[in-house]
């Protein structure tokens, strides 16, 4: 009987050791999954930062040239406005005189097609 109870005790101890090993393996697996997830997140963040940096560089190259283009257009617009304003101030007086003379200096004449009937 004692050998049977010793055998049962050994089986119970072996079962307990197997259960402990199984729990430890599950813990290691959980730790490893957590570690793998952290590594993947870090790698994704690194990749995202790298791609964003490349995007910003390309955007700067493209937008930089467009920025120069918009600056040129603004300069041309400003120059055109300046020229128009100068022309306006230069010609305003003479145009006002021409308009007033056309409106005010009327010489009445009979139209050549007018027929006077008596």
Image (cartoon, rainbow, N blue to C red):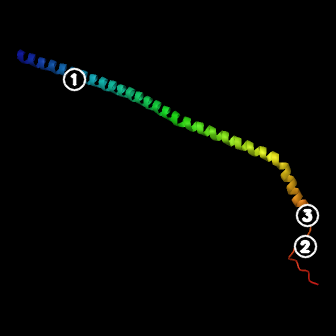
Circle 1 packing at 10 Å, graded few (<14), some (14-19), many (20+), is few
In depth, the one of 80 and 53 nearer the eye is 80
Residue for badge 1: 22
Disc number at residue 80? Answer: none
Disc number at residue 110? Answer: 2
First along the sequence among labels 2 and 1: 1
Nearest to viewer (mark 3 / mark 1): 3
CA distance for labels 2 and 1: 123 Å
Residue drawn 85% across and 56% down? 99
In the picture as drawn, the residue positioned furthest to the front comes out as 112
Relative image position of residue 19 (x, y in whole percent) = 20, 22
Query: Considering the image in quadrants, where does the C terminus appear?
Result: bottom right
Q: Is residue 107 above or below residue 17?
A: below
Query: Considering the image in quadrants, where does the N terminus appear?
Result: top left
In the picture as drawn, the residue positioned furthest to the bottom comes out as 118
Residue drawn 47% across and 30% down? 53
Q: Going by the image, does 58 lie left or right of 1?
A: right
In the picture as drawn, the residue positioned furthest to the right comes out as 118
Relative image position of residue 47 (x, y in whole percent) = 40, 29
Residue 29's quadrant in the figure?
top left
Residue drawn 91% across and 64% down? 106
Q: Going by the image, does 58 lie left or right of 19?
A: right
First along the sequence among labels 3 and 1: 1
Relative image position of residue 44 (x, y in whole percent) = 39, 30
Helix, strand or loop under label 3: loop
Disc number at residue 106? Answer: 3
CA distance for labels 2 and 3: 13 Å
Q: Is residue 67 above or below residue 39?
A: below
Residue drawn 25% across and 21% down? 24
Residue 78's quadrant in the figure?
top right
């Amino acid at each position: 009987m004692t050998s049977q109870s010793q055998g049962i005790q050994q089986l119970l101890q072996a079962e307990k050791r197997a259960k402990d090993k199984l729990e430890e393996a599950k813990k290691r697996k959980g730790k490893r999954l957590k570690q793998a997830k952290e590594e993947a997140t870090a790698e994704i963040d690194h990749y995202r930062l790298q791609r964003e940096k490349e995007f910003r560089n390309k955007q700067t190259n493209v937008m930089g040239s467009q920025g120069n283009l918009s600056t040129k257009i603004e300069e041309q617009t400003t120059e055109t406005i300046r020229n128009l304003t100068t022309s306006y101030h230069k010609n305003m007086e003479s145009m006002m005189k021409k308009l007033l003379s056309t409106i005010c200096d009327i010489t009445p004449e009979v139209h050549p097609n007018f027929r006077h009937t008596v």
